[in-house]
Image (tube, helix red, strand yellow):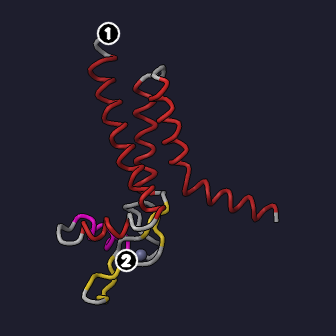
Amino acid sequence: MRAQTKRKLGKFMLHNWGYIVLIVVAIWWHLGTIGPLPIAIGSSLVVIFALFCAEVPCCAPNKRLVNGEIDFCGNNGNGILGACHLKRHKWLNLKSLVSRQTYVRSLKHCVSSFSGAAGSFSALAGLGSFTVALLTYLFVTTKK
Ligand SMILES: [Zn+2]
């Protein structure tokens, strides 16, 4: 029982540690006493987490069409770019995200679940936070 709880917690941490980092980064921004460099590092970790670790729906399209629409893989993937456990889907997922014809539908599929929306939000928040922190570091901190 205890080992099972531990394993569950480990799995939970594997798919959610980035959200904890995101909260820490948000607190750092709020406090304003932490330099921009740790914030930039924390933010880049959040982006890496969202792209490769967060539990988000796999965006690889299935070959079959359902009601004339693309049907997406129903599995959960590791991160927005990671796709699910199927090797074939890693490539299909990436392809559907960069293809102009399918990326809007893929992203819609990705944010259709709560975990997908949370993962996508983290990616954007992390990217924004990283950019601002880096600019602050380059133009404010180094000019003092
Ligand atoms: Zn898949």
The answer to which quarter of the image holds residue 105 is bottom left
Q: Is residue 91 magenta?
A: yes
Q: How many marks?
A: 2
Which SS type dominates the magenta stretch? Answer: helix
State which region is magenta: 87-98
The spot of residue 19 in percent (x, y) is: 51, 48
Q: Nearer the viewer, mark 1 or mark 2?
A: 1
Residue occupying the point 26% across, 20% down: 139
The spot of residue 120 in percent (x, y) is: 38, 55
Residue indicated by mark 1: 144
Q: Name the N-terminal-most of marks 1 and 2.
A: 2
Residue occupying the point 75% across, 61% down: 5
Residue nearest the observer in this picture, 25 or 98 = 25
For label 2, the SS is: helix
Q: Which mark is residue 85?
A: none
Q: Residues within 10 Å of mark 2 (few under 14, many from 20)?
A: few
Residue occupying the point 35% across, 30% down: 133
User: Residue farthest to the right?
Assistant: 1
Which quarter of the image is occupied by the N terminus?
Answer: bottom right
